[in-house]
Image (cartoon, rainbow, N blue to C red):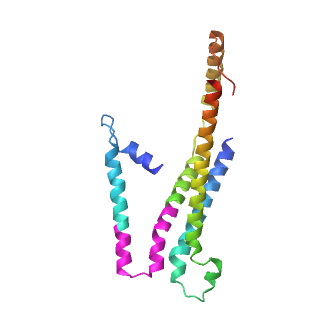
Amino acid sequence: MLTFGKLTNSQDKGAPFSPMKHIFKIISLLAAISAFWVGLLQASIIPRTHTWLLPIYLVVSLGCYGLLMVGVGLMQFPTCPQEAVLLQQDIAEAKGFLKDKGVDVGSD
Amino acid sequence: MELADRAVGLLLTLISLSIFTYFTFWVIIVPFVDSDHFVHQYFLPLEYAIIIPVFAGVALLSLLSLFVGSVMLKSRKKKNKKA
């Protein structure tokens, strides 16, 4: 959700889609984090065992953040009851039309 | 039902927030507390902070690959039946 939002927000209407810039941003962020982690290992301010835990903590917090975004999005998802009814009418109409023409519409 | 969706969403947010706070406390705050504080009896030993996420990640990856493999097998069987 985080990357999809960034991809759509950073594009103008006429700008061509450039996936490479986004990859470079992610790679540079990862390189900065790993440099910080290796620096922390070398400086030995914190005991070694705790420094080894840091990447796992980051991955777990990233997973938690994704889950949080899914939950928040679920809670705020807008439903449109009128559009749902209209859509069902459209579907029934299209099915009847296609069945008359002889196309196999299948069952749901 | 909209209410069921919102309940599931609320449950997910609560689960994620609780997991995040517990894990943060476990990894960052508890190691710097004195050994004879009462807080240590609420948290497992620190090795489990590595074992449990890695195990969960491996289980998630294997379940995902199982699901993808079963879907691929089903689609191939359907295609063979039709042709």
Which quadrant of the figure has residue B33? bottom right
- Of residue B51 and residue A8, the one placed in the foreground of this image is B51
Quarter of the C terminus of chain B within the rendering: top right
Left or right: where A22 falls relative to A105 = left
- Of residue A99 and residue A78, the one placed in the foreground of this image is A99
Residue occupying the point 60% across, 34% down: B76
Left or right: where A19 falls relative to B39 = left
- Residue B37 is situated, as x and y percent measured from the top left of the image, at 60, 87
Residue occupying the point 59% across, 61% down: B56
Magenta span: predominant SS is helix
Q: Is residue A92 magenta-colored?
A: no
- Residue A14 is situated, as x and y percent measured from the top left of the image, at 30, 34
- Residue A107 is situated, as x and y percent measured from the top left of the image, at 69, 25
Q: How many marks?
A: 0
Residue occupying the point 55% across, 79% down: B30
Can residue B49 be seen at all in this image of the molecule?
yes
Q: Which residue reaches farthest top?
A: A101
- Of residue A37 and residue B79, the one placed in the foreground of this image is B79
Magenta stretch in the rendered image:
A35-61
Can residue A75 be seen at all in this image of the molecule?
no
- Residue A18 is situated, as x and y percent measured from the top left of the image, at 32, 42
Quarter of the N terminus of chain B within the rendering: top right
Which quadrant of the figure has residue A98? top right
Q: Is residue A89 above or below residue A100?
A: below
Q: Is residue B66 above or below residue A49?
A: above
- Of residue A68 and residue A100, the one placed in the foreground of this image is A100
